Image: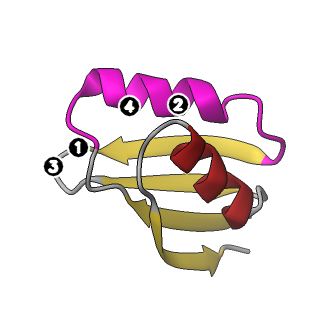
Amino acid sequence: MADIIFQINDIHCEKCVEKIRKALENLGGLEEVHFDLDEKIVRVEGEADPIAIEQIIQDTGYTAVQLQSENKH
């Protein structure tokens, strides 16, 4: 399983979070999604493709920049 962290500077509220969460819910390999509105980051756990995650976030109208990806054993 991997943790992938994205910076999303244009999320501002819970409505933004729910919009992104709903867009990601059908993506295979996704275990959990954690948002930090104060830091404007989203941490994704699972085996989902980081490029697919970034594209879905961008298709939802937000700008995602991958900060890190680390594998957990």
- Alpha carbons under labels 2 and 4: distance apart: 6 Å
Residue tagged 2: 21
Residue tagged 3: 38
Q: Amino acid at mark 2?
A: Arg
Query: Residue at position x 61%, y 30% from top?
Result: 23
- Mark 4 touches mark 1? (CB < 8 Å): yes
Q: Quadrant of residue 61?
A: top left
Q: Earlier in the sequence, mark 2 or mark 1?
A: 2
- Mark 2 touches mark 1? (CB < 8 Å): no
- Mark 1 touches mark 3? (CB < 8 Å): yes
Query: Residue at position x 56%, y 53% from top?
Result: 44
| Location of residue 56 in the rendering, given as x and y in whole percent from the top left corner | 63, 45
Residue tagged 4: 17
Q: Amino acid at mark 3?
A: Asp
- Alpha carbons under labels 2 and 3: distance apart: 17 Å
Residue tagged 1: 37
Q: Amino acid at mark 4?
A: Val
Quadrant housing the N terminus:
bottom right
